[in-house]
Amino acid sequence: MAKRRHSPEQVINKLREAEVAIADGSTVAEAARRIGVTEQTFYRWRSEYGGHRIDQARRLKRLELENSRLKRAVADLTLDNQILREASEGDF
C-alpha cells in the first residue's frame, strides 16, 4: 500500500471530521476508517495537531524545517572546526 503525505491543513480538516463523527456516537475506529487512516495514525495526528489551527500547523512545520537546517549547519561547522584543530596540531 502506497504511503500518502498529508499537508497540515488536510490533517487538521480530517481530525475535525473525525471529531465530529466521534461526537455523533461513532467509535474511534469507525471515525478513523471514515477519514481514510488507521487508528494509530489518528492518535498520532491528534497528539501532534490536536487543538491547532491551520496557520499554527503551517508555522510549526516551517519551524521544524528551519530547525533541521540549522542543526545541519552546526554539525557541518563543528566538523570543519575539528578538522582544522587536528591539522593545526600536526608537526610541520
Image (cartoon, grey):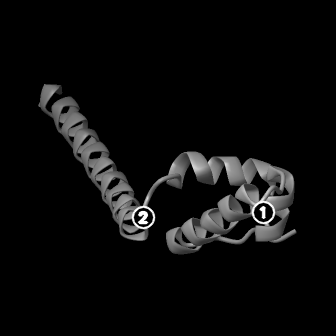
Q: Is residue 91 visible?
A: no
Label whose residue precedes the other's in the sequence (1 or 2) = 1
Q: CA distance from mark 1 to mark 2?
A: 20 Å
The extreme front residue here reads 24
- Mark 1 in CB contact with mark 2 (< 8 angstroms): no
Q: Nearer the viewer, mark 1 or mark 2?
A: 2
Residue 65: in sight, yes or no?
yes
- Amino acid type of the residue that numbered disc 2 sits on in the rendered structure: Arg
Residue closer to the observer: 72 or 6: 6
Up the image or down, 55 lies above or below 71; here it is below
Q: Which residue is mark 2?
A: 53
Q: How many marks?
A: 2
In the image, taking residue 14 as reference, residue 21 lies left or right, namely right
- Secondary structure beneath dot 2 equals loop
- Image quadrant in which you'd find residue 79: top left
Find residue 26 and report its horizontal and vertical position in percent: 83, 57
Mark 1, residue position: 37
Q: Residue at x 71, y 56 (%)?
A: 23
x and y, in percent, of residue 3 in the image = 75, 68
The three-letter amino acid code for the residue at tag 1 is: Val
**Considering depth in this image, is 6 or 3 the residue closer to the camera?**
6
Q: Position of residue 10 (x, y in %)?
A: 58, 74
Within 10 Å of disc 2 (Cα), the crowding (few <14, some 14-19, many 20+) is: few
**Depth check, front residue: 88 or 7:** 7
Residue 10, label in figure: none
How packed is label 1: few (under 14 Cα within 10 Å), some, or many (20 or more)?
few
Q: Is residue 14 left or right of residue 28?
A: left
Residue drawn where x is 31% and y is 47% of the image: 71
- Which residue corresponds to the image point at 76% horizontal and 69% vertical from the top-left? 35
Using the image as rendered, state which of residue 2 and residue 50 is in the foreground.
50
Query: Residue drawn at (64%, 48%), measured in percent from left and top?
Result: 44
